[in-house]
Amino acid sequence: MSLLDNLNEQQKQAVTSVDGPILVLAGPGSGKTRVLTYRIAYLVQEMNVYPYHVLAVTFTNKAAGEMKERTEHLLGGTLGGATIGTFHSICARWLRREAEWIGLNPHYHIYDNTDQTSAMRAALKDLNINEKSYTPRSILSTVSRAKNALTLPADLSARNYREEIARRAYERYQQILQENDALDFDDLLLRATLMFHDYPEILQRYRERYQYIMVDEFQDTNSVQYQLVRQLAGNDGNIFVVGDEDQSIYRFRGADFRNVLRFRQDYPDVRVILLEENYRSTGTILQVANAIISHNKQRVGKILHTAREKGPLIAVHNAYNETEEADYVCSEIQRLQREDQYAPGDFAIMYRTNAQSRALEEAFVTRGMPYRLVGATRFYARKEIKDALAYLRIVHHPADEISLLRVINMPPRGLGEKTIAALLTWSRQVNTSIYEALQTWRTAPEQLPVQPNFSSRAKRLLRDFAAMWATWISVSQQVSVPLLLDRIMSDIGLHEYLLRKDGDESRWENVQELRSVAADTSPLDPEEALTFFLEEVTLVSEVDNLPEGTNVPTLLTLHMAKGLEFPVVFITGVEDGILPHTRSFDSPDDMEEERRLFYVGVTRAKNRLYLVHTFRRTLWGQEQLATPSRFLRDIPKTFIETGKQRSQRRRMARLTPVDDSAPRRRTAPAAKPGSQQFAPGQKVRHAIFGDGVVVHTALSAGDEEVTVVFQDAGIKKLLASFAKLEKVI
Ligand code: ATP
Ligand code: MG
């Protein structure tokens, strides 16, 4: 069987057009990513292109891994030499390789958000700028925007005082990064672009190497990324990009879907290929998606049809509050597993903001249902993990002051702020890194131009620390990363410290988890393995923290869901103010982006789609009445299951008993009317509305008015004497 047999005509065309610039524009689920993968296999297998000449850029490390795997599978072998990765990871590798040519320490390390904030905080302090008036976060976002637009500090506009502050902070921040041999995420792209700009001979080498360039999710590239692609492809390279303007959702990070237009202008002889068949979703889901996106004005309409069946109607559910919302999601997941043989891993629950995950997580935990969470409490953002990594960093790169300051007194070893300040001042006076200064002081103090001014206790503590530090560095050249980590952790007594502080093992277990990640890195020579490990760890994007192969539901933000697909998708919090987010209310452009985000979520679903909103929601500590999202109004009613259809379906399902082991609820007749019989939290059953929970009761005109949230029928206010509610125990 040929490689091309698994593709439709348009897809075949895209795969076999190998020369010149090609742009594939197509809607979700039309096989863009599939085409890109097949194209790599085709080039290697049919066109005898050496994998070494292939460069494929994807959006997440996970996608890159999948692409490698799929291509290798298609080829029935390994794909040695091809470069497949995210823009960031690929640039990191190039910069490391060319470091010496461009005046960069080859052992540079990569700062993540928290490191960046510390560095910016330090910059503001150095400039005597009040952190309260100019928060590190706001200045960092200006810096990020500047970098993504290829603007250096000297070129940043400073038309007013605020901008001047930002410019100076940017400048100082860069100096701090440089002093620490560090680059932030944006620098990776910026420095690579500058490298190609400033060193034509390097660019020439890369152009000769990368004769076939492919970019997935092209609509979400920003200016620097576009520039990189442009530089490498030149005017006559074989450049193949795929994307969907309707799925551009990273504007806030500088993504600009007008890059598609730029591409067309820069390559006037581009071949545009459209894919029109969706292989992912049912007819109903696709029509719902089309109805939503067609309300955006800034778009070129596309044709997208599916050969799949119509499938079930979508569910729009109104829950009382976020707790009931989460309960509803969990019980639907359990029901679908029971009735329709879905596996736990078939479900995804998506939300607009990270804060929404808490209520969902609680519901999963309460029911003892395992899940994986992408986002907020990311593994690598945990304090103990960052501490452990900081230790590895100072071993890998002793000049890394930010990491050192993070751990010099962690676990607390009596090195107070005063001592640390004295240490910093003294290292500046002797004009070397803290590491060098400490080691000279420890071994040959007479060689120092200035002696430090420490208390005798601090002297002892610092000598001990410096000695351990030197030992770790020599150990690191001899043993694997896990063993090095063991050695450091035992020297600093982290396990005992965490146990003492928390009274349990959970944080230490996280550190052990990190150890097992380290054990998975390729067995290169110890030094290289450490470099490799730290690089990988820093680059893992949030979505990549999913433990692979675990068969459990996934909780993730809509932004993280890009490019993925799931048999059943729940989108929660489909409310005005959340989706669309309040921030977008005053800006038509932002509103269109919110709509695209909703569209991305909807189009992740293969078979079933649930849109859930609440009546009241507590979010960010505030309880408010919620309004259903305006986007819901764009969905024709014919695609939404009505309460009646739902009950009917339920009744049918109940006729076919599947799980006899499930505990049955007992019902009891309610007591006499007239007195207060119900209390919030009471589970009840109604002849028409089905099962529900009482959320509020009040005596009114001698009768009891009960507010009930029904699983299917939503919220109802009922009079107890008429409603004949049964209490469910
Ligand atoms: P998105 O815009 O969401 O990233 P996409 O255009 O990249 O979507 P893919 O993820 O490549 O779409 O494909 C969607 C699904 O359809 C995948 O499961 C893929 O394997 C399947 N698919 C694509 N083309 C075909 C085909 N010709 N035959 C069978 N299945 C296909
Ligand atoms: Mg894709």
Image (spheres, helix red, strand yellow):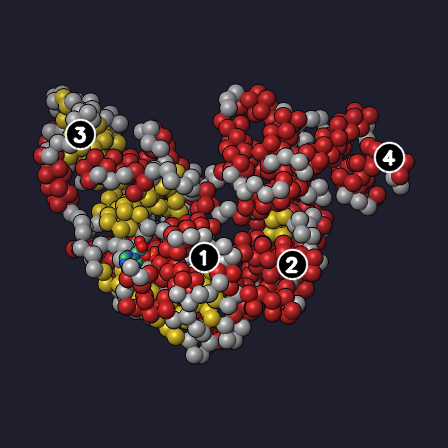
Q: Identify whether 241 is placed above or below 268.
A: above
Tell me the crowding category of disc 4: few under 14, some 14 to 19, or many 20 or more residues within 10 angstroms, Cα based.
Answer: few
Q: Which mark is residue 659?
A: 3
The answer to which of marks 4 and 2 sits earlier in the sequence is 2
Q: What residue type is labelled 4?
A: Ala
From the viewer's perspective, tell me whether residue 627 is left or right of residue 180. left
Q: Is mark 4 on a helix, strand or loop?
A: loop
Name the residue that disc number 1 marks.
Answer: 58
Q: What residue type is labelled 2?
A: Glu
Q: What residue type is labelled 3?
A: Asp
Residue visible at 60% across and 52% down in the picture:
184
Name the residue that disc number 4 marks.
Answer: 444
Tell me the crowding category of disc 1: few under 14, some 14 to 19, or many 20 or more residues within 10 angstroms, Cα based.
Answer: many
Q: Which mark is residue 98?
A: 2
The answer to which of marks 1 and 4 sits earlier in the sequence is 1
The answer to which of marks 3 and 2 sits earlier in the sequence is 2
